[in-house]
Image (spheres, helix red, strand yellow):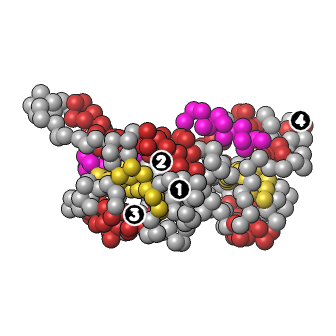
């Protein structure tokens, strides 16, 4: 490492995030990085021996930044996560230690909403199923491909009307869908119907689009009772977190025809979804990539660098998490 590199701010990378791999060269021209995954040392030993004076960290949404990890980073004052979600970070411990946390915030909302609508259209109009039907050479011998369903006029219930949920609602309203929602707080600035329970929402909808954060309260929020309330013509789209749905019960309801289909970008046990889902033509699967577009990764690189630059120059962070 050259003497010039020694002058660059030191960052420990935990994960690493996808954006770090994509923009490694650009990142490395601005900062000096500790890369635990390249070492044979277990993470606690690596951090304890090499990162005790490190003040800033980048982490992915898949990395569990627990109190035990933080204990090995006594000088840490900033965490920048590439995720909009924060359930992977022990925020209580960060606050106790005086560690600021910056995140993606609403940055990904349009991209995630686009995929949510894409998954819904795919399930209803059987786009992926039709693609397999044609490519597998079945069309000449089975000309009667099953009918799909129209999107316009569907009653869509959005679970979690935050920035992503609002973007989903805006898009689906343009398709002529009726919008209602269930959220932690009622949104006085929208005209959509609000329901006080998710069961009530499901009972009045054809489609549920899950956009909420994963918390203790939302873990398995969509259980068997909710799915049965949605009914045999109902479709579920999940671009939130896998464990918001009881995946075992989802599989059972799909196999028994108790709901009509699902579009899933997230799963309880990633990267290994329930194998029963692979064979179902009424299910469309995506590898947790709702945020992954060329444009979003370039913008995220700039946002992460902006937060790091702000920290090391004593300026306000660009996307610090709000105080509770």
Name the secondary structure under disc 3: helix
- The reply to whether callout 1 and callout 2 are in contact (CB within 8 Å) is yes
The span from disc 1 to disc 4 (Cα, nearest Å) is 48 Å
User: Residue at (29%, 52%) from the top-left corner?
Assistant: 261
**Residue 32 visible here:** no
Q: Which residue is mark 4?
A: 4
Q: Position of residue 44 (x, y in %)?
A: 70, 64
Which one is earlier in the sequence, the residue at label 2 or at label 3?
Answer: 2
Q: Which residue is mark 2?
A: 169
Q: Position of residue 16 (x, y in %)?
A: 64, 49
Confirm whether the magenta stretch covers residue 128: no
User: Residue at (53%, 56%) from the top-left corner?
Assistant: 161
Q: Circle 3: is it few (<14), some (14-19), or many (20+) Cα within 10 Å?
A: many
The span from disc 2 to disc 3 (Cα, nearest Å) is 15 Å
What residue range appears in magenta?
280-306
Q: Which residue is mark 3?
A: 201
User: Residue at (72%, 37%) from the top-left corner?
Assistant: 302
User: Residue at (73%, 33%) from the top-left corner?
Assistant: 26
Which one is earlier in the sequence, the residue at label 1 or at label 4?
Answer: 4
The span from disc 3 to disc 4 (Cα, nearest Å) is 59 Å
Q: Which residue is mark 1?
A: 161
Which one is earlier in the sequence, the residue at label 1 or at label 3?
Answer: 1
Q: Circle 1: is it few (<14), some (14-19), or many (20+) Cα within 10 Å?
A: many
Q: Position of residue 195 (x, y in %)?
A: 44, 65
- The reply to whether callout 1 and callout 4 are in contact (CB within 8 Å) is no
Q: Nearest to the eye among marks 4 and 2: give it.
A: 2
The span from disc 1 to disc 2 (Cα, nearest Å) is 8 Å
Q: Circle 2: is it few (<14), some (14-19), or many (20+) Cα within 10 Å?
A: many
- The reply to whether callout 1 and callout 3 are in contact (CB within 8 Å) is no
24 or 128, which lies in front? 128
Residue occupying the far left of the picture = 141
163 or 32, which lies in front? 163
């Amino acid at each position: 490492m050259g003497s010039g590199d020694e002058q660059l701010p030191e960052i420990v990378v935990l994960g690493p995030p996808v954006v770090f791999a994509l923009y490694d060269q650009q990142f490395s021209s601005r900062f000096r990085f500790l890369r635990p995954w390249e070492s044979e040392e277990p993470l606690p030993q690596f951090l304890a021996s090499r990162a005790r004076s490190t003040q800033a960290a980048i982490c992915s949404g898949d990395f569990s930044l627990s109190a035990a990890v933080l204990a090995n980073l006594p000088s840490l004052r900033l965490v920048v996560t590439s995720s909009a979600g924060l359930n992977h970070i022990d925020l209580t411990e960060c606050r106790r230690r005086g560690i600021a946390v910056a995140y993606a915030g609403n940055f990904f909302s349009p991209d995630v909403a686009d995929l949510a609508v894409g998954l819904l259209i795919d399930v209803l109009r059987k786009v992926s199923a039709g693609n397999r039907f044609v490519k597998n050479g079945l069309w000449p011998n089975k000309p009667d491909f099953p009918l799909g369903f129209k999107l316009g006029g569907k009653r869509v219930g959005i679970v979690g009307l935050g920035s992503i949920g609002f973007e989903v609602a805006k898009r689906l309203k343009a398709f002529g869908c009726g919008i209602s929602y269930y959220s932690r707080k009622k949104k006085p600035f929208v005209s959509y119907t609000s329901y006080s329970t998710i069961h009530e929402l499901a009972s009045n909808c054809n489609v549920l689009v899950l956009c909420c954060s994963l918390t203790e309260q939302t873990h398995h929020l969509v259980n068997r009772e909710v799915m049965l309330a949605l009914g045999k013509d109902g479709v579920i789209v999940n671009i939130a977190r896998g464990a918001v749905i009881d995946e075992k019960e989802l599989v059972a309801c799909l196999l028994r025809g108790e709901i009509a289909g699902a579009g899933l970008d997230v799963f309880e046990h990633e990267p290994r979804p329930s194998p029963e889902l692979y064979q179902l033509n009424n299910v469309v699967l995506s590898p947790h990539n709702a945020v992954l577009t060329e444009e979003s990764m370039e913008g995220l690189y700039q946002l992460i660098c902006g937060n790091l630059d702000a920290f090391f120059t004593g300026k306000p962070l660009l996307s610090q998490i709000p105080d509770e």
